[in-house]
Amino acid sequence: MSLLGKYFKGWRFRTSRPAFKQGSEVDVFIAESNGTSGRAYIGDTELVIEGAGPDCVEKQVRVRITEFDEAAASGRGEFVEVVGESSYDG
């Protein structure tokens, strides 16, 4: 393996449209809520989170993915728990 190959071993580029598998759990920040569900944006990917009400806005929450459409970069999930606060709160 070349020196350059050794240097870049394990490196990968991040995508602006991450995909999620059904049943996986991810931590996201809730950007907005309509009262019963919240929305999170991860790059160009949009998730609708059932059960993430207005009290979850600008908080980091754990979400269980229930469905995901990779072609549309959108999906749905269910709120599990609050895991952190936003650094912009307060």
Image (spheres, rainbow, N blue to C red):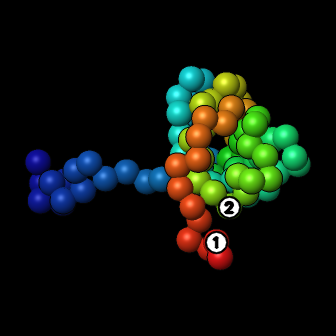
At horizontal 60% and vertical 35% (from top left) the residue drawn is 80
Picture mark count: 2
Residue type highlighted by circle 1: Asp
Splitting the image into 4 quarters, where does residue 13 fall?
bottom left
Residue type highlighted by circle 2: Glu
| Image location (x, y in percent) of residue 44 | 69, 52
At horizontal 74% and vertical 53% (from top left) the residue drawn is 55
Give 37 or 14, whichever is nearer the viewer: 37
State the CA–CA distance, disc 2 to disc 1: 7 Å
Residue 39 seen in the figure: yes
- From the viewer's perspective, tell me whether residue 26 is left or right of residue 55: left
Give 65 or 62, whichever is nearer the viewer: 62
What's the mark number on residue 59?
none
Residue 54 position (above or below residue 62): below
| Image location (x, y in percent) of residue 42 | 63, 52
- From the viewer's perspective, tell me whether residue 78 is left or right of residue 9: right
Residue 31 position (above or below residue 88): above
| Image location (x, y in percent) of residue 7 | 18, 59
What's the mark number on residue 58?
2
Question: Circle 2: is it few (<14), some (14-19), or many (20+) Cα within 10 Å?
Answer: many
Give the residue number, with chain letter if any, for mark 1. 89
At horizontal 68% and vertical 61% (from top left) the residue drawn is 58
- The mark nearer the N terminus, 2 or 1, is 2
Residue 74 seen in the figure: no
